[in-house]
């Protein structure tokens, strides 16, 4: 039985995409889809990954999708420890940028890391900055990746409250909803809006209502069964209206993958001027 939901291994690629490679080094199809929907959505952006699990998506955003900084948040301390270890492992495989070459992800073989141990992110970052300092060109500096253990839905931690250009909530809304009920979901959406810059994006991977019903089994948190009876908001019908109340408007959507990906954009001043 888990304390907070079915989190262990929950966000792995193969979990939702049968036949997909299970390796966390393979680009997550959800991130690839988002890049196709909104080109360069992550490049040079500050990104928040809410419910980051063991950190595979968070690290990919930094190393594979060129985010400037990524903050991964999860309620499970064990998963945050795994995420930090994963970051250390993947950082150890990176060849930092030089005057002549760009940063190369997964450059050093896994066997080298297993044989010689992890090279800390701090050391790789320091080398990357040193090699690009005073350069006539500006290869990508080392992205900032931070993992924090907290319940983001109710946290007042300014270090995880943005402002972000992009917020991800991939297959995590159900657990927030079951734990904090309708009022907690409304507060979560309000916080998402306040944590985004104008024109920023909120990305939701929607868990349908039938998924909620599966979450109240004997191996799940026991209070979920009673909480499910008290929930009135439905992911298929209520979320867009709730988000619009906080200035987050539907921007893009795809049902190409097993779970719908919906992107909401925060209104900016130009939208107001145009009357959008």
Image (cartoon, helix red, strand yellow):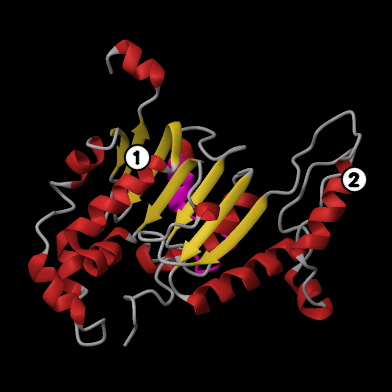
Q: What range of the chain is rendered magenta?
A: 21-34
155 with respect to 233 (left or right): right
Residue 158 locus on image (x, y percent)? 51, 52
Q: Is residue 249 left or right of residue 229?
A: right
Q: Where residue 203 sits in the image (x, y, percent)?
A: 38, 45
The residue located at (18%, 73%) in the rendering is 214
Q: Horizontal placement of 125 versus 28: left or right?
A: right
Q: Is residue 72 visible?
A: yes
| Whole-percent x, y for residue 117 in the image | 80, 77
Residue 232 vs 119, above or below: the answer is above
Mark 2 — residue? Answer: 131
Query: In percent of the image, x 33 and y 37: which residue is there?
Result: 264
Number of other residues with Cα within 10 Å of mark 1, as a class: few under 14, some 14 to 19, many 20 or more:
many
Is label 1 in a helix, a strand or a loop? strand
Residue at image coords 25%, 55%: 185
Measured Cα–Cα span from mark 1 to mark 2? 37 Å
Report the residue marked by disc 1: 263
Q: Check the image and name the residue furthest to the top.
A: 274
Q: Is residue 95 visible?
A: no
* Residue positioned 72% across, 62% down in the render: 91
Q: Could you tell me which quadrant the C terminus lies in?
A: top left
């Amino acid at each position: 039985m888990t304390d907070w939901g079915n989190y262990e291994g929950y966000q792995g690629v193969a979990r939702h995409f049968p036949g997909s490679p299970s390796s966390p080094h393979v680009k997550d199809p959800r991130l690839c889809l988002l890049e196709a929907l909104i080109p360069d959505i992550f490049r040079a952006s500050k990104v928040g990954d809410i419910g980051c699990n063991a950190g595979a998506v968070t690290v990919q955003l930094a190393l594979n999708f060129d985010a400037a900084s990524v903050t991964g948040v999860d309620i499970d301390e064990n998963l945050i420890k795994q995420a930090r270890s994963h970051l250390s492992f993947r950082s150890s495989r990176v060849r930092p940028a030089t005057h002549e070459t760009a940063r190369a992800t997964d450059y050093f073989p896994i066997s080298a890391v297993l044989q010689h141990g992890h090279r800390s992110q701090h050391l790789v970052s320091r080398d990357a900055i040193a090699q690009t300092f005073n350069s006539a060109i500006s290869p990508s500096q080392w992205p900032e990746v931070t993992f924090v253990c907290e319940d983001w839905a109710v946290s007042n931690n300014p270090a995880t409250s943005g402002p972000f250009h992009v917020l991800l909530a991939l297959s995590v809304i159900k657990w927030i909803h079951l734990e904090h009920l309708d009022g907690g979901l409304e507060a979560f959406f309000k916080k998402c809006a306040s944590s985004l810059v104008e024109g920023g994006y909120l990305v939701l991977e929607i868990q349908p209502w039938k998924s909620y019903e599966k979450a109240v089994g004997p191996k799940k948190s026991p209070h979920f069964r009673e909480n499910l009876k008290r929930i009135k908001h439905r992911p298929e019908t209520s979320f867009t209206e709730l988000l619009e109340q906080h200035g987050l408007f539907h921007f893009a959507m795809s049902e190409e993958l097993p779970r719908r990906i919906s992107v909401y954009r925060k209104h900016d001043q130009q939208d107001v001027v145009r009357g959008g």
